[in-house]
Image (spheres, rainbow, N blue to C red):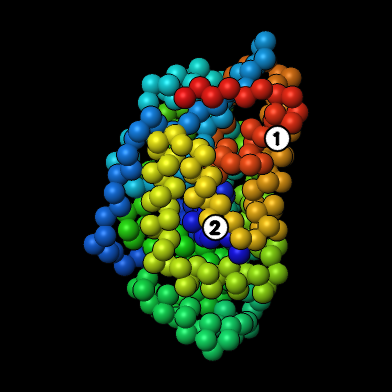
Amino acid sequence: MMKLASVLTLSAAPFALLAASPVLATEPAPTTAAAPAAPTGNGPALWKVADEDTTIYLFGTVHVLPQGVEWYDTTIAAALEGSETIVTEIPMNAAADAQLQQLTMAKGMLPQGTTLRSLLTPEQAATYSAAVAKLGMPVEALDTFKPWMVGLTLSLLPLMQQGYDPNSGVEKVLLAKAGNKPTDALETAEFQLGIFDGMTQEAQISFMMEAATGIDEMKPMLDRMVTEWAKGDADRLAEVMNEGMTDPAVAEALLYSRNANWAEWIDTRLDTPGSVFIAVGAGHLAGAKSVQDYLEQKGISVARVK
């Protein structure tokens, strides 16, 4: 499978889910570990696609950050303020959050009468129970949820306990600064959650067990990704991500096919005059088969602004 820290840089829905779901929003046990502020360096990278009457900015985000990371500089501000529309991966507003709660119950629950631990071997159950105990939660708390949902929980809550905050996520900051600008989205939350829900039960359990066994590694790896993102080093960010890219099928579903779809969206949007600021997970704008690569294949030039 793919390392969970990589997954969390590629999909916005888990972090929206964290805010929207009463299960994932369960108050975690606090820890004394503090999340260090990432170095700002030259600041996160920003790209631009333009023709004679359309400008589209591409900005790579981190969906959850420690408080106090300074990244919103004058270049990013000018691009956002000069854009008529801000586009995120999925809709991000109160109505979308309410819909996400409904989707959580529709997609994330096991059939009545089935419990999560009944799907596990004794060895897996012991490892899983130890991971849940580390989070300060009773092992029964997640018994009614599918393995993919529990895998996301086991990866998200440790980050929150150690200083990462969805409310500091880049999209939330950008939307707040955008004020009343029109918004749009490249995908639906249902589509993103469907990527996880569409995995076989065996793959879901593998996904969850990787989160359980790697619960102590989640924050250090995401720290590394945030550091490279804050420096604007897209190549190094891709290298760190690729350390966790071990399943080609997951990488195709979660990253490459979506990048190709988004490049098609941008190609079509260039036919409409105006200016757009697109904010998507930084992993989509780094490395091979990035959104930029697919745009170049279409003969569309991408210029780095910063």
Q: Is residue 48 visible?
A: yes
Q: Of callouts 1 and 2, which one flags the residue occurring earlier in the amino acid sequence?
A: 2
In the rendered structure, find residue 149 and report the number of the disc placed on it. Answer: none
Q: Residue at x 58, y 83 (%)?
A: 120
Q: Residue at x 53, y 73 (%)?
A: 209
Q: Is residue 173 visible?
A: no
Q: Secondary structure at mark 1?
A: helix
Position of residue 267 measured from the top left corner of the image (x, y, whole percent): 72, 27
- Residue 269 as seen in the image, left or right of residue 170: right
Gap in angstroms between the C-alphas marked 1 and 2: 22 Å
The extreme bottom residue here reads 122
144 above or below 193?
below
Position of residue 33 measured from the top left corner of the image (x, y, whole percent): 26, 60
Disc 1 residue type (three-letter): Tyr
Q: Residue at x 60, y 73 (%)?
A: 205
Q: Nearer the viewer, residue 227 or 178?
A: 227
300 above or below 53?
below
- Residue 174 as seen in the image, left or right of residue 2: left
Dot 1 crowding, Cα within 10 Å, few <14, some 14–19, many 20+: some
Position of residue 221 measured from the top left corner of the image (x, y, whole percent): 43, 56
The extreme top residue here reads 52
For mark 1, what is the residue?
294
Disc 2 residue type (three-letter): Gly
Position of residue 2 measured from the top left corner of the image (x, y, whole percent): 58, 60
Q: Secondary structure at mark 2?
A: loop
Q: Residue at x 49, y 56 (%)?
A: 5
59 above or below 149?
above
In the rendered structure, find residue 244 and report the number of the disc placed on it. Answer: 2
